[in-house]
Image: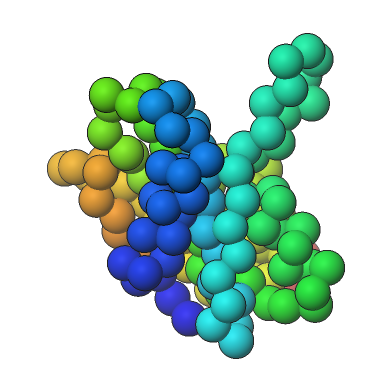
Amino acid sequence: MGIDQKLVDAAIGLLEKRFVGTEGIAAALYTADGDILTSVFFEPEWGGGGLCAETGAICEAEKLGKRVTASVCVSRLSSDDPIMILTPCGICQERLFHWGGEVEVATPHPDDPQQWVSKTLAEVQPYYWVNAFK
């Protein structure tokens, strides 16, 4: 399963449900069997132990023994701001590479960050360090 509007809508739906009227970040992943796993970012009040929005869904996929095929992350700064597509951060790219460079990720459209463009991790990170060992 690749990125489609259903997956994007799952992330947006969770963002709107979990972060009513506030800033927030949410993610949705497809597994190879078509399941959608979702999660949100974790930012503790004290300390630096925050976790990216994709982390919970990535851990859930691993717990269930499922292969991730696509990931989307969405964010807004306040209830008045538009919902934006976020490319996975470097650590989430590293986590998603567990399932290979063909995993699709949503990236913001160059002309409109509210729209998404699907790219593989290999396209987003063409010089991924593990390639040196292949």
Q: How is the image coloured?
A: rainbow
How many marks the image carries: the answer is 0
Q: Between 44 and 130, which is closer to the camera in this rendering?
A: 44
125 relative to 41, above or below: below
Q: Position of residue 6 (x, y in %)?
A: 36, 69
Residue 124: tell me if it is visible. Answer: no
List the single residue furthest toward the bottom: 33
Q: Is residue 50 above or below residue 60?
A: above
Q: Nearer the viewer, residue 46 or 122?
A: 46
In the displayed orientation, state which residue is furthest to the top. 46
- Residue 106: quadrant of the picture: bottom left
Residue in the image at 42% along x and 66% along y = 7
Whole-percent x and y of residue 4? 35, 71
Residue ranking furthest to the left: 111
Of the pair 87 and 121, the residue shown nearer to us: 87
Q: Nearer the viewer, residue 57 or 17?
A: 17
22 left or right of 18?
Answer: left
> Residue at (52%, 59%) from the top-left corner?
28
Please determine whether, in this image, residue 8 is positioned above or below residue 63: above
- Vertically, is 12 above or below 130? above
Percent position of residue 94, x then y = 68, 52
Q: Is residue 31 left or right of residue 47?
A: left
Task: Tell me residue 127's x, y (percent).
Answer: 57, 54
| Residue at 19% over, 42% down | 112
The residue at the point 67 percent across, 58 percent down is 57
Residue 22 visible in rendering: yes
Quadrant in which the C terminus is drawn = bottom right
